Image (cartoon, grey):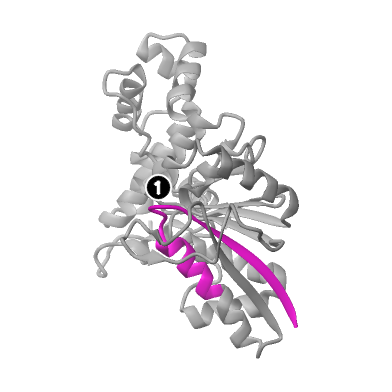
Amino acid sequence: MRKITIGLVVFPRFQMLDIAAPGDAFAEVKVLSNGECEYEILTIATTRGPIQSSSGLTVMPDRTIFDPCPHFDTLIVPGGLGVFDILEDTTLTDWLAAQGESCRRIGAICNGVFALGAAGMINGKTVTTHWMDAARLAAMFRKATVEPDRIYVKDDSLYTTAGVTAGIDLSLALIEEDFGKQMALDVAKYLIVYLRRAGGQSQFSPLLEVQVKNDSPVAAVQNYVLNNLNVEHTLLSIADEMQMSARNLSRVFKQETGLTLMNFVNDARIDAARRYLESTDLGLSEIARRCGLTNAATLRRIFSKRLGIGPSDYRQHFHSDATMAGTAN
């Protein structure tokens, strides 16, 4: 029998689903393999005694970071409201860094990546997190490359994911690596989830939840772009409109949002198209025109590349009204 040991780190106000969902997925491997394959799952706490999750449910951990632990093949840090309370806990960050040296894989679910960042483990890495925390992550850990709209990202032995249910996607990916695609497919079927979500790796997030202060010049830039999506924007044209130098605009925008200005423009176009597809029956050509994407063919190409699903398929999945008309233009 092949056994793989996985450690799940827990801390006060962690997200329960971040450990429960992967834990159930990993546990199912033993059942479906008739005991030939198994994950040993251990919870490792930052303090002694019961640990209360953000939902109020409590777990009794198997170990703490102060206790001797077995060698972990894989270590996973969940997210949760409490993650920002532990970033300055050097005992934890030192422990995580040491585990990173010995584990085959280390991962974070949702904003658990902030703990890895505090441990210096995401410098020079490409990572993701829940879309609501992406700008904050990019601002706090500037040596990391943050991809804000991915379900999960693998960079060598480091795995990071989007919010909550993305932990299932991560666990299925790890199961496929360890025991093959058929086992991952069998677990996905049992859990009644996609092995690969429709839309590939996209979170289907509102891409523009990049909050800045209302009196910031960047807020004015964002409002201008959002109110003029049909315009063919360039860095120079926006700088002229804002009466700023292109160099200063580029620097300030990236500093405050974690995105380049033109990435924001492109995300704005796709996000607007996404909303039109969800809430209207406008044809693709008209949506493309309103979003500054030239024509329907350009919309299909860019939308599919960005979200991993075509606009017509996206509309079929997410339109608020099952009776639609005029979608074939």
Is 14 covered by the magenta stretch? yes
| Residue 326, x across and y down, in percent | 30, 60
Mark 1 element type: helix
Residue in the foreground of this view, choosing between 320 and 140: 140
- The residue at which mark 1 appears reads as 82
> Which residue range is magenta in the image?
1-25
Decide: is 135 above or below 16. Answer: above
| Residue 143, x across and y down, in percent | 61, 30
Decide: is 320 above or below 240. Answer: below
The three-letter amino acid code for the residue at tag 1 is: Gly
Horizontal placement of 175 versus 230: left or right?
Answer: right
- Quarter of the picture containing the C terminus is bottom left
| Residue 58, x across and y down, in percent | 37, 65
Observer able to see residue 323: yes
| Occupied quadrant, residue 257 | top left
Horizontal placement of 189 versus 313: left or right?
Answer: right
| Residue 68, x across and y down, in percent | 66, 59
Q: Residues within 10 Å of mark 1 (few under 14, many from 20)?
A: some
| Occupied quadrant, residue 195 | bottom right
| Occupied quadrant, residue 39 | bottom right
Residue at horizontal 46 percent and vertical 9 percent from the top: 245
Residue at horizontal 67 percent and vertical 35 percent from the top: 124
Horizontal placement of 61 versus 242: left or right?
Answer: right
Observer able to see residue 266: no
Residue in the foreground of this view, choosing between 123 and 53: 53
What number of labels is visible? 1
- Quarter of the picture containing the N terminus is bottom right
Residue at horizontal 59 percent and vertical 36 percent from the top: 145
Is 182 covered by the magenta stretch? no
